[in-house]
Amino acid sequence: MNRIGVLRRITLGMAFTGLVSAGAWAQAQDPTPQQQDIRQDKKDIREDKKDLNRDRADRNADQRDINKDKRDIRSDKRDIRQDNRDIRNDKQDIRQDNRDIRNDRTDLAKDRSDRNADQRDINRDKKQLARDDAKYGANSSQAQADRKDLHQDRVDRNKDQRDINQDKRGLNVDRRDRNQDVRDLNRDRQDRNVDARDLHNDKKDLHKDRKDRNKDQKDINKDKRDLHKDRADLRRDRNHK
């Protein structure tokens, strides 16, 4: 019995060795055309998935760019509206400054006219005082009245001169304000023009990003079709194996 068992084990060992050798020989043989097709199909599927992932990443990046462009456009429009409000306010300030300047000029002309009239009164009072001093004496009632009139005219003349000086200062202030408002208006117009150019450029960028996004979406759709086709080829090649 022991001898028979030994022979049986030897036979089984030889059979197992033959099977292993046959499997190794089969693996060493060149793949069949069906196996080559299956390998190529799997490779195509892997490439399709890679292309699909890349195109999706590009599409998502383009969508982010589109969202940013939309935000930029909204911001540019807000800036332009604010610039237009600033321009309107500057124009109103300039009109008010010009009205103030005209009023200051009117007041200045009136005060100068009053000052000149007071000066003529002073000159006339001086002449009258000299005549009354010569005719009635320095202490006469006529001379005292002339001195009182002369004093009052000088007070009026000095007040008118102060008004003139005040009008000049006001006129200079209004002119400075008007000039500053004109500079503000020019600066706001420049800002509005810059914002308008930014808006135009952002719209162009949005249009370009949308084209890129649409192209990427077409690529995604094509990759999906290719992936579907390659999977169908893989199933067909497996069934024909």
Image (tube, rainbow, N blue to C red):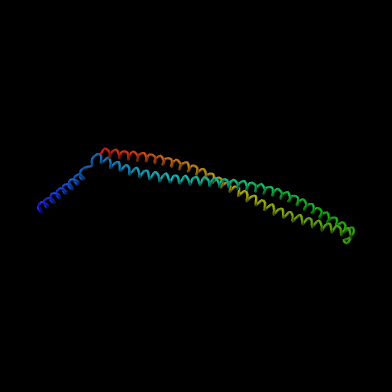
Q: Taking 171 as reference, is 139 left or right?
A: right
Give the tally of numbered discs: 0
Asked if residue 150 is positioned above or below residue 11 in the image, the reply reads below
Residue closest to the eye, 19 or 11: 11
Residue drawn at (35%, 44%) of the image = 49
Q: Taking 196 as reference, is 139 left or right?
A: right
Residue placed furthest toward the bottom: 139
Residue closest to the eye, 84 or 12: 12
Residue drawn at (67%, 51%) of the image = 174
Q: Quadrant of residue 217?
A: top left
For the C terminus, the image quarter is top left
Residue closest to the eye, 123 or 75: 75
Residue 16, horizontal then vertical, whole percent: 16, 49
Residue 154, horizontal then vertical, whole percent: 80, 57
Residue 89, horizontal then vertical, whole percent: 63, 47
Residue 12, horizontal then vertical, whole percent: 15, 49
Q: Taking 146 as reference, is 88 left or right?
A: left
